[in-house]
Every structure is written in C-alpha cells, then in structure tokens.
Image (cartoon, coloured by chain):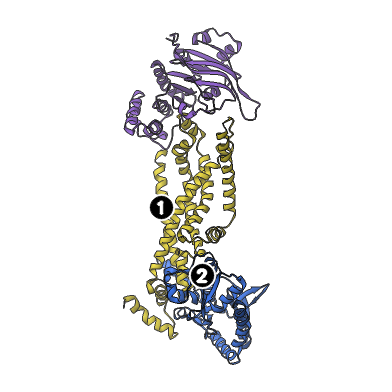
Chain colours: A blue, B yellow, C purple
C-alpha cells in the first residue's frame, strides 16, 4: 500500500519535477476544431492560433505548437510548467482546482444541430433525447443539464457526433456556434439545420500550469492589451462572419 | 454535510488562496475530486459493469465463433474432396469449401487491421443508421475481432490432439461434428487454455477502444471524470486498478479451471 | 477347437478392394476379395507394409477405398449415399494405441457412445459397462482416468468400450503391438474369451500363437494382396506359397 501511494504521488509530482525553465513555451492543442484550430497543409490556423501568436509577441516569449488529442492537452499542461493549453478549453470552477486559467477570451455561444424534420425548437423538446457532444467541452456540460448524463453521448470528436446525427443515432448535437457553422458549411447536408436555443456557454481560457504564475501573469496582461486594441473583433470578423454567412 | 466534505472544505480554501498543500492533502484532494465528490465512484462502477458485460459476452460469442472458424480451417476440411455423384452433396461440399476459404480470409483481415478501425466501421458503417444499444455494438465488434484470434489458438489446440482420438470417435459411429464436440474440442480447449486466457485478458483491456463510439465503459468513465476535474492521472490510475482487478480474477478462475482439467493427467 | 466349423452367413463381403494413397505411387491394396462369416475369427497376418492394416481400416471406411465394394450386412457401405455412421456403430474397433479418451473416466469412455448414439439411459449404459468391466476384472477402475492405467488395462478397457455398442463384428488393429511383453497375455486372454463367446472378429496381429489357438481362418497378406488363405493348421504347418514360408520362418 505504501509503495502504491509512493507511485501515485510520483506520477502526480511529475509536473513539478520537470520544471525546466526554457524560454520556449509549448502550445498543446487539438487542431480538429475549426474555426478555432485546424490544419491547413503544413500550417496550423484558426482563431486560437492567431490569438496565441499575438499574445506571445506581446508578452515576449517564443512558442512552438504541439498537436495532440483533446484529452492529452490536460496532461501535457500539468506535466510541464512551460506548456500551455490553447484549444477551445472551457473555464470551470472545478478545473481551476487542478490548473490555472487566463481571463476568458471568447464566449461564442452554443447552437444545436438537429434533423430538419425533427421539429425541436427549445431545450424542453430535447429533454430525455440523446444528445451527441464532444466530451469535456462546454457543449458537454450544457447537454448534461438538458437531458442528463445518461443521455449525453460523449465522443472523442464532435465530428463523430455529427455522423451519428446523420445516421439518426442521436437526436441532436450541441456544439460551439462558430464550430457548428463551419462544419455545416463544409458538409452541405440539407437534412440538417441549426437551431439557436439560447444556450449559455462557458468562457474559453488559456490553460496554464499552477506552478507557473509568472507566465499566467504575462498572458493575462497581453490579453488585456489585445482586447483594448480591438483584436478580438478583428479575429471574429476573420473567422466567424464569412462562415456564418456561408451556412445561412 | 458528509465527513468527506468537511475534510475537503479547508483544502479547497487553501487551493483558492494559492497555499501549498501537504503531501497527504494532495492525495486527499485527488481522491475527493476524482472519486468522492458528485458520487463519482458510481461512474467507475457503472463503467466497470459495462466493461464486464461487453467482455463477458464478447468472450462467449467470440469463443463460439472462433471454434467454428477453427474447425473450418482444419486440414480435415480444407483437404476434403467429395467423390460421389450426389448433386446435393456436391453443392454442400462446394459450400463448405467456400466457408473454409472465407474463414481464412476473415482471420487474415481481422488480424491484419486495427481493432479501432473495425469498431469505427461497425458503428459508423454497418450500424450507421441503426439505433441500438452501444453495448450490443461493442459486443459484436469485440466478439468478431476476438473470434479470429481464438480460432487460431483453438486450431492449434485441435492439431495437438492425437489423430487416433478422431479415429476412435468415428469408429464408434460418431459423426465428424459429434466427435469434434464430445472428444476433440474438450481436449483441444484444455491445451489451448493458457493461450486463451491471454486472449481474454487482451480482450478485456481492448474494450477500452469502445470509448470512441461513446460507450461509457471503464476507460470512458475515467476520461469523463478527468474532463471534469482536469486531474492528469488519478482517474486513469483508478480505472487501471479496476482493470487489473478484473484480469487478476480472470487469471485465477482460468488457473482453477486448468487445475480441474488436469485431474485426468495423473 | 480351431478346426471347429463356424460357417454362418456372410456378414462382410469384400470385392475388388483397392486403395491408393495420396501421391499415387504406392498401391496399398490391389483387388482384395474375401468374406467374413458370422461367428468367425479371421486372423490377418503379413509383413509390415503388406496392406493388412489398410485392409482392416477399409472395412469400416476409416480409410476410403479407391475402388471395390464392401458389403456389410447386405448393404454396400462404399456407396456415398449410405450413412456410414450408422453401420460403424455395429463394428467395434480396437487400435494399436488404445485411443481411450483421456479427458473422460473409464466409465464415461464406455457410456458416451451408447448414451449419445443409441439413446440409452445413463443408468442402463453404466450398468452394462460395469458388467463388462467385471468380465475383464477392472470394475474397480471405473472412475479412474486412462492415464492412471497400465497399457494392458487400457487395451482391455478399449475392448470393452467397443463392446458397449453391442457390435456385430469386432476389428482389431494390432492390439498387442504397443504393449510391454508382460501385458500381452492379459489382452490376448480377453480376446480369446471374446472369440469363444461367438463374436465375429477380424484381427490384424503378429501373435501367431493367438492365430493358431482361436483363429478359424488365416489370411496372409503381402504387397497388397491375399497371397494365401486357409485354416491356421494349413497356413502354419503346410504353407503352399514361398512368400508365406519366408515370412513364417522369420516370425516363428
């Protein structure tokens, strides 16, 4: 038993042990979430990518991107104080106990994707129905509130949830508004439609290791400057408006 | 307020005040967040139950199908020629040869492709528009996969049984299938048991892949809690211990079975 | 005793029996004709590779003849339309290597076929099996597993296992060849007793003493053919063919 505890602790302390103070900050993210992050050829692009590049420039540190599963971002940040997570991550109170978050930089709102003939218009219509989501996203939390944990089908990627909706295996999919717009525009599936049920989303924040308050301070300062300079609006125009227009 | 919450509150206070936690406080924090608060221990048990259900039925159906595939791959079948002129028997022989060929094809394809792809194809392709319990899809995918491995294990077991056993059975008037069932397979299973145990342990662990199709089995339960608490390791360690418990129990059970079958050895 | 005439009806009739093995070069049997009469003890002898075992194994189609017919109780069992399993139930077979089922007790070895194939009740089958075990003095080993028995015991069990199906004829394929010399006697005693009880038997064996004592007729095989046949006295005391003489000189 003692050994087991020692092992547990050793694993949990991995992050502290590896507190190397390099100048380069690693950005852990999952580039399968357009328009926030995606891969275009050999380039990463998206709202989050542009944002963190601007932050790094303002705060004066180098960044390198490291693509991984959404699940793995959590561990990557906790394992290394010089790794940050920028991947459309919702800020929740419970998560704040394990990692630090920057100030929220966007709250894009949630939309519901349903079959056109379903007639679902409000969240009440979705009670007890099966709702597909990407696990751990703000959509996931919203879906649990509407239909309960047991009726929330949690996928590794929201794309799988959309596929199941096309196959009638879930009744609705909840997803971030810009993400939903982008995917529907590229799918061009006439049988699907978007409903705005006025769902509240969580703010997205940049995830920072608890051992590195210095870096957190730099990032928050940079975000404040960028917000004051109107950079958020600039990004919104670049990434959301044309996609929304295309979907509507 | 439960005793667990009473212990938790000062720690929560310390975290929000950014005070460093002691060693034991850190452990309690991890345990409280990942297993106690919100009744999360129930999620592990639910996940464990789903994993057990899927594994059990996948082992049962996988072994049955594996036995059939194994027999279809035996030289008795692959080298069988029908010399008579009865058209019905001719057709039956041709059909048998087709099944034998298909069994080989099936085993090659299943063993040569990743389980994850098979699961995704079964869920999004074959059951693309059919809404059934994900547990059933999980059982089908895992049983179909395991059958290919079990088939080769049992085929090896059958080949290790002395040919005289088949002759003795046939000479008494048992049909080929009856001899297989009553005489050859029980002996083949005995010699195949250690390898089968390996396969079953692998199968239990591989059911974790079903989290990709939103089946909340044990790994998914850990993933889920982790997505809420952002604890890097603790949910995985808890899930891992439960997997270890399952495989250890299975190993013991099969060990017991082996000892009982060995009763005929001395 | 050996000259006692037991010419009952013909139970097995073999005509033109031919067997090629895969590869085609070796012809194990070339056109064998003979009849087995009810109640007769037919002993088959010959050098190794002469086809005598193949001949025996063709009788219940463990080897599929390439050509020729085998008529058992009036039915041509080489006809593909015939369900051979039914006819095999009436032909007991005893193997050189016993081939008991190692995962079953002696009693289960003896009752599985009657219970499964003849639909006898378990009690009835066990009663019959126990009776037979007593006849061979092995009743105390009923619940033993085959690997706990000596070779001689195994072969005696194998014989009574075949008898549990109440066969019309018993086929013996060198039943004493795999035994330690001190165990040959106990098996031959059982076979002699069986012969005296009137069982029809076809025995491939190297035991010339047994052939002489209980055989009604002896077939001498060489190169896939019956070279000579006759009563044991004719074959052993006054062989006509040179090949028979050569063989007997070597083994006697």
Q: Is residue A31 visible?
A: no
Front one among B2 and A130: A130
Q: Which mark is residue B126?
A: none
Classify C225 as above or below B24.
Answer: above
Chain to which the residue tagged by mark 2 belongs: A
Residue tagged 2: A117
Q: Residues within 10 Å of mark 2 (few under 14, many from 20)?
A: few
State which quadrant residue C9 falls in. top left
Asked whether the residues under the numbered discs 2 and 1 touch, taking CB atoms below 8 Å apart as contact, a structural biologist would say no
Q: Secondary structure at mark 1?
A: helix
From this view, report whether residue B14 is shown above or below residue C86.
below
Residue A210 picture location, percent across and down: 50, 81
The tag on residue B252 is: 1
The answer to whether A184 appears left or right of B242 in the picture is right
- Residue closest to the far top: C238
Q: How far from the left and from the top, in percent, is residue B218?
A: 45, 64
* Badge 2 element: helix
User: Is residue B242 visible from the viewing direction of this image?
Assistant: yes
What is the spatial separation of the Cα atoms under label 2 and label 1, in whole angstroms? Answer: 54 Å
Q: Nearer the viewer, mark 2 or mark 1?
A: 2
């Amino acid at each position: 038993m003692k050994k087991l505890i020692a092992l547990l602790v050793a694993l949990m302390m991995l992050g502290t042990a590896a507190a190397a103070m390099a100048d380069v900050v690693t950005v852990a993210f999952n580039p399968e979430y357009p328009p926030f992050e995606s891969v275009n050829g050999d380039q990463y692009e998206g709202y989050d990518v542009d944002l963190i590049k601007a932050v790094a420039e303002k705060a004066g540190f180098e960044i390198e991107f490291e693509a991984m599963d959404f699940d793995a971002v959590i561990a990557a940040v906790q394992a290394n104080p010089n790794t940050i997570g920028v991947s459309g991550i919702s800020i929740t109170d419970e998560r704040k106990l394990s990692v630090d978050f920057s100030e929220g930089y966007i709250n894009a709102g949630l939309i519901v994707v349903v079959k056109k003939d379903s007639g679902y218009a409000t969240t009440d219509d979705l009670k007890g129905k099966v709702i597909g989501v990407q696990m751990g996203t703000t959509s996931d939390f919203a879906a649990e509130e509407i239909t309960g944990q047991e009726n929330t089908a949690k996928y590794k990627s929201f794309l799988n949830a959309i596929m199941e909706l096309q196959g009638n295996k879930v009744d609705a999919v909840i997803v971030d508004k810009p993400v939903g717009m982008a995917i529907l525009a590229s799918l061009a599936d006439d049988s699907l439609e978007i409903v705005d049920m006025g769902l509240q989303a969580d703010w997205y924040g940049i995830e920072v290791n608890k051992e590195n308050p210095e870096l957190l301070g730099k990032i928050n300062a940079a975000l404040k400057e960028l917000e004051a300079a109107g950079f958020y609006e600039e990004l919104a125009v670049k990434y959301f408006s044309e996609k929304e227009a295309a979907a509507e | 307020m439960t005793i667990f919450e009473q212990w938790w509150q000062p720690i929560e206070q310390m975290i929000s005040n950014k005070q460093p936690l002691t060693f034991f406080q850190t452990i309690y924090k991890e345990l409280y967040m990942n297993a106690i608060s919100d009744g999360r221990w129930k999620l592990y048990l639910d996940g464990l139950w789903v994993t057990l259900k899927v594994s059990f039925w996948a082992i049962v159906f996988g072994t049955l199908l594996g036995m059939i595939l194994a027999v279809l791959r035996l030289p008795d079948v692959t080298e069988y020629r029908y010399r008579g002129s009865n058209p019905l028997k001719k057709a039956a022989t041709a059909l048998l040869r087709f099944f034998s060929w298909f069994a080989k094809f099936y085993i090659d394809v299943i063993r040569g492709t990743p389980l994850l792809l098979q699961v995704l194809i079964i869920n999004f392709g074959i059951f693309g528009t059919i809404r059934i319990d994900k547990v059933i899809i999980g059982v089908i995918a895992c049983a179909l996969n395991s059958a290919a491995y079990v088939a080769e294990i049992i085929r090896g077991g059958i080949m290790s049984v002395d040919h005289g056993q088949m002759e003795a059975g046939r000479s008494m008037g048992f049909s080929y299938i009856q001899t297989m069932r009553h005489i050859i397979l029980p002996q083949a299973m005995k010699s195949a048991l250690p390898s089968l145990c390996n396969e079953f342990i692998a199968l239990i662990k591989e059911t974790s892949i079903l989290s990709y199709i939103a089946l909340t089995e044990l790994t998914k339960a850990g993933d889920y809690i982790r997505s809420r608490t952002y604890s890097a390791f603790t949910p995985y360690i808890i899930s891992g211990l439960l997997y270890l418990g399952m495989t250890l129990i299975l190993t013991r059970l099969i060990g017991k079975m082996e000892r009982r079958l060995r009763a005929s050895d001395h | 005793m050996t000259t006692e005439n037991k010419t009952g009806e013909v139970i097995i009739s073999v005509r033109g029996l031919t067997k090629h093995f895969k590869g085609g070069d070796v012809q194990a049997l070339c056109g064998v004709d003979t009849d087995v009469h009810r109640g007769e003890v037919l002993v088959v002898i010959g050098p190794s590779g002469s086809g005598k075992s193949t001949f025996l194994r063709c009788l219940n189609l463990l080897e599929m003849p390439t050509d020729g017919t085998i008529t058992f109780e009036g039915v041509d069992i080489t006809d593909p339309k015939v369900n051979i399993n039914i006819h095999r139930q009436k032909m007991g077979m005893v193997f050189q290597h016993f081939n008991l089922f190692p995962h079953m007790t002696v009693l289960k070895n003896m009752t599985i076929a009657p219970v499964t194939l003849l639909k006898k009740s378990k009690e009835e089958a066990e009663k019959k099996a126990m009776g037979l075990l007593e006849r061979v003095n092995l009743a105390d080993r009923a619940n033993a597993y085959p690997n706990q028995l000596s070779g001689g015991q195994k072969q005696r069990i194998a014989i009574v296992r075949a008898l549990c199906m109440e066969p019309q004829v018993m086929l013996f394929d060198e039943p004493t060849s795999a035994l330690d010399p001190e165990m040959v006697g106990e098996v031959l005693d059982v076979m002699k007793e069986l012969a005296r009880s009137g069982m029809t038997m076809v025995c491939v064996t190297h035991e010339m003493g047994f052939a002489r004592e209980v055989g009604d007729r002896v077939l001498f095989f060489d190169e896939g053919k019956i070279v000579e046949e006759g009563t044991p006295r004719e074959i052993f005391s006054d062989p006509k063919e040179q090949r028979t003489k050569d063989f007997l000189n070597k083994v006697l």
